[in-house]
Amino acid sequence: MSNNLLKGKRGIIFGALDENSIAWKVAEQCFAEGATFTLSNAPVALRMGAIRELAAKCETVVIPADATSEDDLEKLFAESMEVLGGKIDFVLHSIGMSPNVRKKRHYTDLNYDFFLKTLDVSAVSFHKVMQTALRMDAMNEWGSILALSYIAAQRSFPSYNDMADAKALLESIARSFGYHFGKQKKVRVNTISQSPTPTTAGTGVSGFDKFLAYADKMSPLGNASADDCARYCVVMFSDLTRMVTMQNLFHDGGFSFTGVSEEVMDLL
Ligand SMILES: NC(=O)c1ccc[n+]([C@@H]2O[C@H](COP(=O)([O-])OP(=O)(O)OC[C@H]3O[C@@H](n4cnc5c(N)ncnc54)[C@H](O)[C@@H]3O)[C@@H](O)[C@H]2O)c1
């Protein structure tokens, strides 16, 4: 159902790989709410994924960008403003990747080149996106920038590996950059801490199915789906949330504030 919550707004959505991606659902919902936006992903993902299908559905274009490359990001913002006909109102950073997770390196036996890559792709890229946007004066006042996080930033989830450190950095960057973007341009910056969700990145975490089932049983409302997350992103991009900034917003069915649930107790 459309309420035209984003009518007249222009955006950039990073990270739609396939129809399971959270960014894919966000793009669909933003389109339904009247936004115009460009889609972006790493060049390699463009070859593997189905993003062009999504672009056709959302009547838009795909602009390749490795989010760790400042040159790519500058081109992306310039082309997006040209295609969309003006400055940007919202950005979704839905990007995560850990070579240590991919190569199954244990957290106590990390490869440090991989570790730096994890941090660059999954967290520092968020800083690069914002620094590029600020330098180019590419954001409209009262714009909204979001990244997706996970509660391993606050609590230990052993199998989440070095992505936990990346998420802690990501959330810190949202606070630190949020201050400056707010002061200078009235742009808000937040992270949404989402329930485990069955996507390519999610299922890469070892023991993901158990992880998903545990979170579901621990959450009074159950796990939040990718579609639920997309609806929350729409609200955060809309004018209904203009004064919310520098926050990490839990979107997890209550998981983050539940000590233990009856369902989990019953299993013991
Ligand atoms: N799936 C979950 O359980 C879950 C839970 C909480 C938060 N998140 C976060 O949500 C975000 C989206 O992940 P997802 O679950 O939709 O999985 P996904 O695999 O569909 O999306 C991850 C995206 O990151 C992109 N990417 C990787 N390296 C890149 C680079 N160098 N430049 C640009 N893009 C790059 C990939 O191509 C992919 O599109 C991530 O930040 C992830 O950590 C996921």
Image (cartoon, grey):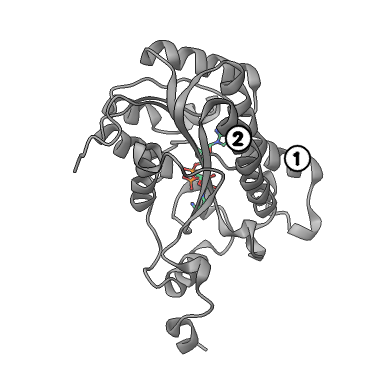
The quadrant of the image that shows the N terminus is top left
Q: Position of residue 197 (x, y in %)?
A: 44, 55
- Mark 1 lies on a secondary structure that is helix
Q: Position of residue 48 (x, y in %)?
A: 47, 32
How packed mark 1 is, by other alpha carbons closer than 10 Å (few <14, some 14-19, many 20 or more), is some
The answer to which of marks 2 and 1 sits earlier in the sequence is 1
Horizontal side of 36 relative to 173 (left or right) equals left
Q: Residue 150 or 89: which is nearer the viewer?
A: 89
- Mark 2 lies on a secondary structure that is helix
Q: Residue 101 or 141: which is nearer the viewer?
A: 141
Q: Which amino acid does the dot numbered 2 rest on?
A: Phe
Quadrant in the picture for residue 96 = top right
Residue under the point 36% across and 69% down? 221
The disc placed on residue 116 is 1
Quadrant in the picture for residue 124 = top right
Q: Position of residue 240 (x, y in %)?
A: 35, 42
Q: Which residue is mark 2?
A: 126
**Marks 1 and 2: in contact by CB < 8 Å?**
no
Residue under the point 45% across and 37% down? 17
Relative to 24, say whether 84 is above or below.
above
Residue under the point 47% across and 13% down? 79
